[in-house]
Amino acid sequence: MIYGNPADKTVDDQAIAAFNEAYGERAGALPPVAIVIAAYNEEGAIGPVIEALPAEVCGLATTAIVVADGCADGTVKEALAADAMVCDVPVNRGQGAALRLGYRLAREGGASYIITTDADGQYNPAEMDRVLAPVVAGEADFVTGSRRLGSQETKDVIRRSGVRFFAGTISMLTGQKVSDTTFGLRAMRAEVTGAVRLEQPQYQASELLIGVITHGYKVAEVPATIHRRRVGESKKGQNPLYGLHLPGVNNLFYGARFARVVYGTWWRERQRAGQTEASARAEAAELTEVPELTEVPERIDPAGQSGSAGSSSGTARSGPVDSAARANGSGPGSVEASASSAAAGLAAPVDPAKRT
């Protein structure tokens, strides 16, 4: 896991230590599929969500990991009563930070696959098979549901327009066709989450998606459904002005913050890719570099016999050139043989450095 802020790692380390202490061996022996849910004050919603989760997805056993992100209500108690594994973080940092911690718990616990869903019941657990299937089959490393390929209940024109706008933006920036960048029902190989940099505390959906694409992982989308929230209220885009909750205004603030994350993440990943390519070129250049050959001047000894410098008799003394020639299979003392061998080494193909 790559952390941008050491303080985040400290909080996560402490939370993981408490989680491991609470669950003992179970924390390190998770089933193949971990369903990770980030929750913040979702009392009344989280219980039914957990109870509706399937015991198996694609024929693989599952477990639910709920990261309670500084909850001040009965979310933790309700999740425990529904038989979820709960990681209770004392401070509220945001959905992105909570999911990042959940990914790490799943990876370090031995899960092979991770599925994410929201704590508010907007996603259909029956669609988890469809989302995970391409990953299990090896057809993709990361799969996200798409409301535009499936269906959505919302009539919010601003939100619908925002989904289209950001899908087009990320598709243009990354070269990967994407129709829905913020869908919460996703599936991935567990190790994928440890290879990308995740530092956004809130709007992590786009950061993870862009990171996965720019690292060269196979990404796919499947049709899925998003329902209206039936319990509680959305946490997205809240508090543009303290205590003021106007849907249109909140959506605009959400869009502005989301845009900042999209462009910031894309630029960061572009810089990282450039540095990786530069390092690869430098390494390739070092592998193809040929050492210079030192020419040995000819001299005439007092007896009138010609020979190389450093030779006092008819038998040549072993030197750097002789050693290089013998190492290359040419006769001792043959400068031409050494040069030919070095040229052959330069012509040999060198495997290009692999990108992560």
Image (cartoon, rainbow, N blue to C red):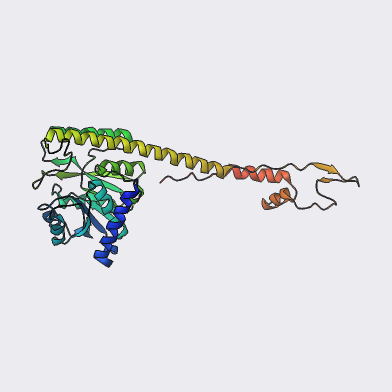
At which x and y percent is residue 41?
15, 50
Counting labels gives 0
Q: Residue at x 14, y 33 (%)?
A: 249
Foreground residue, 10 or 260? 10
At which x and y percent is residue 78?
13, 58
Q: Residue at x 66, y 42 (%)?
A: 292
Residue 345 relative to residue 226: left or right: right
Quarter where residue 147 is shown: top left
Quarter where residue 273 is shown: top left
Q: Residue at x 21, y 34 (%)?
A: 255
Foreground residue, 353 or 120? 120
Q: Inspect this view and state whether residue 156 appears.
A: no
Residue lying farthest to the right in this orientation: 303
Q: Residue at x 31, y 41 (%)?
A: 210
At which x and y percent is residue 206?
27, 41
Foreground residue, 20 or 341? 20
Foreground residue, 62 or 265? 265
At which x and y percent is residue 88?
21, 56
Residue lying farthest to the bottom in this orientation: 25
Q: Inspect this view and state whether residue 346 appears.
A: yes
Residue lying farthest to the front in this orientation: 242
